[in-house]
Amino acid sequence: MNYCPSPFLFHRRQTREVVVGDPARGGVIMGGNHPVVKQSMLTCDTMDTAESVKQTLELVAVGCQIVRITAPTVKDAANLKNIVAELHARGCHVPIVADIHFKPDAAMEAANWVEMVRINPGNYADSKKFVVKEYTDDAYVGELGRIEEKFTPLVLKLKELKRALRIGTNHGSLSDRIMNRFGDTPLGMVESALEFARICRKHGFHNFKFSMKSSNPKVMIECYRLLAARLAELGPDWNYPLHLGVTEAGEGEDGRIKSAIGIGSLLCDGLGDTIRVSLTEDSPREIEVCNDLLAELLKLTKSTFDTGHSTFPFDPFHFERRSTPEIELSDSVKCGGEQTVRVVVTRATFDKVAPKIRPKDDVKPEGIYEDLNLLELDPTQELRIEDINCDTQLVTVKDGVNLPGITAFRLLAAKLKRLGRRNPILLKDCLSFEAAPLEPKIALLRASVVIGALLADGIGDAILVRGESGGGQSLRLAYNILQAAGCRSFKTDYVACPSCGRTLFNLQTVTARIKARTEHLKGVKIAIMGCIVNGPGEMADADFGYVGGAPGKINLYVGKTPIKFNIPEADAVERLVDLIREHGKWVEADPAAAVSVY
């Protein structure tokens, strides 16, 4: 079972076409040989027609091709008629997607007015109660019958009106039924989506796509790989398009890095027909990142080299770090084995940042590239056992090798495996340099895609970022990639949703306020959710959660368990601090540590 023909050579997954709207009047066709479609979502109240139209036009102006609008109630869904009418009156025919959670009636109403409806299998016919229950096979089949009864009317209506559908599972909102049978797993996400797809197919409706979103890039990557493999296994006519996204990625560098790891690595493997970069920022900024990611795709995948290999050097469906011996990287620093993934810098970078490093700093160089006992190999050439003296030799890909970075390091890992060698590997974000330094935003995306994809494969014991020309910036970027990939935790980790019409507070303002109070808490993970739709489940691996419960009221969570309810928003950040303190994870900020090393 494979999710792509080869992990070494780019082949775009061939899918059927899904039509969203009238292509002659601004609609789009996704899948087939069509370019990857960019989309985003409004952040305003759906009942505010004027603001909804304004935000839609702003998105279209920067290149957004599909606009999603939440419809939490039938009333909101009905107002989509007014929004679409006003857009058409202004000459804008961008396809609109109604985002539905919990309310089949809202989906039925929205289908009258918009080109696509998104439903979440985890809550379309189920409410989330975190109930532990054993299902017999007969009981499970009975539940599927209940779901089909609720979902079929929408399928028939979409087919009649020639609308499109997105079957969008979310790691944070799997139904109790799926959780009890499959657990909180990629397999559970895939099976949840396939249940709804089978109902569509039963009624001859095929104009739909899938999405498999998670705030954890590793989980998200595994989900899409498994879905693509399962669809291929089911047969050639199961070739439905995929929408890619890392949900609740956050803001700034962290949000861009998480999105680049998840979306970028899958695009490089040929998966993905539409994308959304979910940022806790103004929506038009998401499109800029989409544009940059897609522009880099050819550079990150261009290769005609026949590796002669098609066997995966890693398990694509279950993360497991590649086994290596532990070795000395530099003075007092080890890598490989059970050691964390280390950060290496060039001598030039070390000379720039070393005077600013303090003894207690977490962000610091752990090795100097030019000083390492390092064997550089060309994986395009045949490797012999005598080329590598022992397993305790650190190895990397030689500069100048004419392969994309992901391909080069996967091929190196494959050839080491064939030789029976377990050498630790130093990953590089680039193997050659362009004439002019890269823009920082492009250097960030390239490094995140290349290094992040390999770390998600389980490959890599140390990393080197050289595409970012700034010394301090390259060091910070390396650590941020490791944090986003789940390899290290050197600072507070935030899971923050991007805002929509369901949001019960200003996410950007509140996120900034929470960060100001908590960003010194190394190793603590805080989820900031505008509403309850994805809240408890998506926060399952967070330590604490700050969730909108009602207008002006906040609920606080420990993991996925609600602890405090209906706290006035003005007091909620300090109550969150109190909760962190009660659970023994609070430390006072060190004023000296506030000075940046960058």
Image: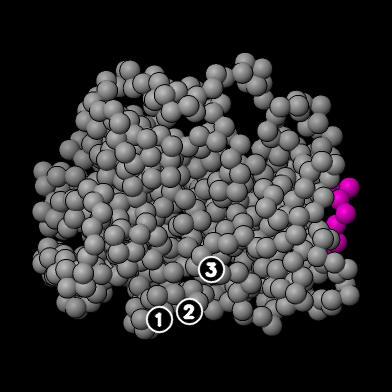
Amino acid on which the number 1 mark rests in the picture? Glu
* Disc 3, SS: loop
Q: In which quadrant of the rendered image does the C terminus lie? A: top right
Q: Which residues are magenta?
A: 369-376
Q: Exactly how many numbered labels are in the figure? A: 3
Indicate the amino acid at tag 3: Pro
SS class of the residue under badge 1?
helix
Residue 340 to residue 108: above or below: above
Question: Image point 60% across, 54% down: which residue?
Answer: 452
Q: Earlier in the sequence, mark 3 or mark 1?
A: 1
At horizontal 17% and vertical 38% (from top left) the residue drawn is 47
Closer to the chain start, of discs 3 and 2, is: 2
Please tell me whether mark 2 sits on a helix, a strand or a loop: loop
Q: Which residue is mark 3?
A: 316
- Whole-percent x, y for residue 441 in the image: 60, 44
Residue beneath disc 1: 233
- Please state the horizontal and vertical placement of residue 184, each as a whole percent of the image: 37, 56
Instruction: Give the spatial CA distance, label 3 vs label 1.
Output: 15 Å
Q: Nearer the viewer, residue 317 or 61?
A: 317
519 w.r.t. 328: above or below:
above
Mark drawn on residue 1: 2
Please say if the residues under marks 2 and 1 sit with CB atoms less than 8 Å apart.
yes
Packing grade of label 2 (10 A; few <14, some 14-19, many >=20) is few
Q: Quadrant of residue 125?
A: bottom left
Q: CA distance from mark 2 to mark 1?
A: 7 Å
Q: Quadrant of residue 578?
A: top left
